[in-house]
Each structure stands twice: as C-alpha cells, then as structure tokens.
Image: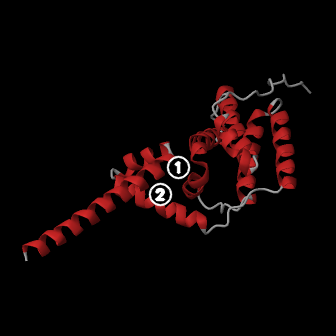
Amino acid sequence: MFALIMIVIGVIALAAAVAAVRRHSRRRQLRQRFGAEYHRLVDDRQSKRIAESELIMRQRHVSELGIRPLTPWQRRRYAAAWAAVLEKFADVPDHAVMDAQYLVCAILAGRGYPLMHREQVISDLSVQHASLLGHFRAACELADHVGAGMAPMLDMRQAMVHYRVLVAELLAPPADQQHAAQLSGRAAALPTQRTRRSG
C-alpha cells in the first residue's frame, strides 16, 4: 500500500512539474511574440494568467481571419499613395496626416484585417506586428488631435513619423518584415513644409 501511495504521489508530482514547464514555455513564447504588449496587458489586467489567456485568444482569433500578404501590385499602389501623402505634407500637413491614417487603414483592409473599432484592430495587429502597436496608438492619438484642429506642426510631423513606420512594415514582403521592424526606430525624413503662396 505504501509503495502504491508513493507511486501516486510521484505521478502527481511529475504531472505538476510537466505542467509548470509547459506554463513557463508558453509564457516565454508569449513574451517573445508580443514584447511590450505582453507586459502592458499584464499590468492592465493585473494578472499574468488572465493576460496570457487573452493573448492566446488573440492568436486563435487572428488565425481565423485569413490575414494575407499584399500582392506586388498592391504594394506598388500603396507605396505610390504613400509618396503622394508625403508630397502633400509639404503644402497641407493636416490633410496629409488624415490621408496617412486612411492609407494605413486601407493597407490593413487589403491584408484582411477587419476594421471594426480601434481597440479590436490593435488586438488583431498585435499577433503578427506587436512591434507596431506603440506607433499605431501614437499615430491614432495624434491624428485625432489633427482632426480636431488641435495639433501643432510638431505633432503633425511626429504623426507622419509613426505612419511611416507603419507603412514600411505593412508594405514589406513577409520575408522583409523583420528587417522593416528593425528600422522602425529610425527617424523619418519628411519634406520641409513649403510656404503657402498667397492668392
């Protein structure tokens, strides 16, 4: 009887150890995949378990969306649209910021992301593009200020810097997206605002 009890205890201990290893491995994978978003969500939910469950649900949800890379034709079209936005920034920066916001939404839609509400877009984007979330949130916040007519020129330029990073990674072919993410911290070169002609 004693030997049987010891065997049962050993099996339970082994199962507990295996479960602990699996939890640790899953946690490490989630941290690597979501980066700062993992820690932000843990702080927000005040629970690693709840945050990790939510991130796993995000992965399952996005796997069912049919997210796809852009075709070469789409990339060329959107790249040309971005060049036009940059040119427009020199004359009418506030309009250019709003156009940049619309362009990013168009690119996301072209890749299969459903454009519901902003937090859902952020949730979906986090699964494959966690490094973009800070840029996306900041760009949207600045664009809101621009739309309300409350953004100084410095904020409009900063919004375009964020949009540049978003466009660069979202347009990159799948094999190049990691490289695009590595460049996301570099400053964007924007056209100097032209003096508007009178008349």
**Disc 2 versus disc 1: nearer the observer:** 1
Position above or below: 10 against 139: below
Looking at the rendered image, the quarter that the C terminus falls into is top right
Identified by mark 1, the residue type is Arg
Residue 135 x %, y % = 61, 40
Q: Are marks 2 and 1 in contact (CB under 8 Å)?
A: yes
- Name which quarter of the figure residue 17 lies in: bottom left
Tell me what residue is drawn at x 56 percent, y 41 percent: 134
Looking at the image, is mark 2 or mark 1 earlier in the sequence?
1
Looking at the image, the residue that sits furthest to the front is 3
* Res. 55 mark: 2
95 or 85: nearer the eye?
85
Q: Residues within 10 Å of mark 2 (few under 14, many from 20)?
A: many
99 or 167: nearer the eye?
167
In the picture of the structure, the residue carrying the numbered disc 1 is 33
Q: Residues within 10 Å of mark 1 (few under 14, many from 20)?
A: some
Looking at the rendered image, the quarter that the N terminus falls into is bottom left
Residue 79 x %, y % = 83, 44
Horizontal relation, residue 120 to residue 6: left or right = right
Identify the secondary structure beneath mark 2. helix
Residue 132 x %, y % = 61, 44
Residue 100 x %, y % = 74, 43
Identify the secondary structure beneath mark 1. helix
